[in-house]
Amino acid sequence: MLTGDYAAWMWFNFLRMENQTIQLRRGELTDAARLATFAARTFACTFGPDNRPEDIAAHLEASYGVAQQARELTDPMYVTLLADAGTDLAAFAQVRRKEPPPCVTGPAPIELYRFYVDIPWQGRGVAPCLMSAVQDAATEMGGRTLWLSVWERNPRARAFYHKSGFRDVGVADFYVGPDRQRDRILVSPIDPRPIHSPRV
Ligand SMILES: CC(C)(COP(=O)(O)OP(=O)(O)OC[C@H]1O[C@@H](n2cnc3c(N)ncnc32)[C@H](O)[C@@H]1OP(=O)(O)O)[C@@H](O)C(=O)NCCC(=O)NCCS
């Protein structure tokens, strides 16, 4: 579980977990290979059990890889946040400017595009800290509404987003390979608080 002073972590961007320290920082081009491996693995772990292997493979081919992650890490429309546990990443999130679906009606929308916490770190306080940094990054991008899409068959993520203040506003198609699935669209107003983590 999260230990230490939460407010202090928010300032220094370090999360002290038992005998490990996690640094929350922005991803850089040099992180591309590490992020590509981590992102593909966490996607496959999350959705592999409920999807056909060939569909997962097609999605990984289309959406992950060192070249793709390098493009995203250097794209000014994206911000990538890493929870770096040293040898391994513990989690990552990406926010980006993207035209939202019509059911997102709030002002200045920013998409929370990816949000993944590795299994050993789930339920231990990493996710809420990363969400707080996501809010800060979206605020810096001028956002006032955070929106995301989550598979309707992902109850843990839906529960986490619900307790993080998101509400359900609609549905959208999402393709894993050729398999059409239904995502829920969630939105949350971005809290206009002072930015807690100016160096993330
Ligand atoms: C979604 C995710 C970021 C949430 O982080 P986390 O550390 O697991 O979140 P928490 O444990 O703080 O909260 C999850 C909540 O879901 C609940 N939960 C767990 N399994 C559940 C299930 N099968 N059904 C419903 N709720 C569930 C937990 O009890 C917890 O609620 P509580 O705090 O009220 O008890 C993380 O699990 C993750 O990265 N999962 C894999 C990737 C993923 O699905 N990403 C989202 C893509 S849109």
Image (cartoon, rainbow, N blue to C red):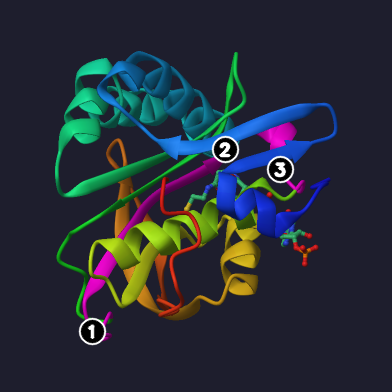
Disc assigned to residue 46: 2
Q: CA distance from mark 3 to mark 1?
A: 31 Å
Within 10 Å of disc 3 (Cα), the crowding (few <14, some 14-19, many 20+) is some
* Cα gap from disc 2 to disc 3, whole angstroms: 12 Å
Can residue 136 be seen here? yes
* Amino acid type at mark 1: Pro
Say which amino acid is labelled 3: Gln
Viewer-proximal residue among 63 and 125: 125
Q: Position of residue 180 (x, y in %)?
A: 32, 51
| Quadrant location, the C terminus | top left
Residue 34 picture quarter: top left
Image-quarter location of ligand 1: bottom right
Callout 2 secondary element: helix
- Of the image marks 3 and 1, the number of the one nearer the N terminus: 1
Q: Residue at x 16, y 49 (%)?
A: 77
Image check: 127 left or right of 40? right
Disc 2 within 8 angstroms of ligand 1 (CB): yes
Query: In the image, which residues are magenta?
Result: 104-124
First in sequence: mark 2 or mark 3? 2
Q: Is residue 180 magenta?
A: no
Instruction: Read off the residue under disc 3.
Output: 122
Residue under the image location 46 percent in, 31 percent down: 52
Q: Nearer the viewer, mark 3 or mark 1?
A: 1
Ligand 1 has an atom within 8 Å of the beta carbon of the residue at disc 3: yes
Work out whether 115 lies above or below 37. below
Looking at the picture, tell me which residue is in the foreground, 151 or 112.
112
- Residue at image mark 1: 107
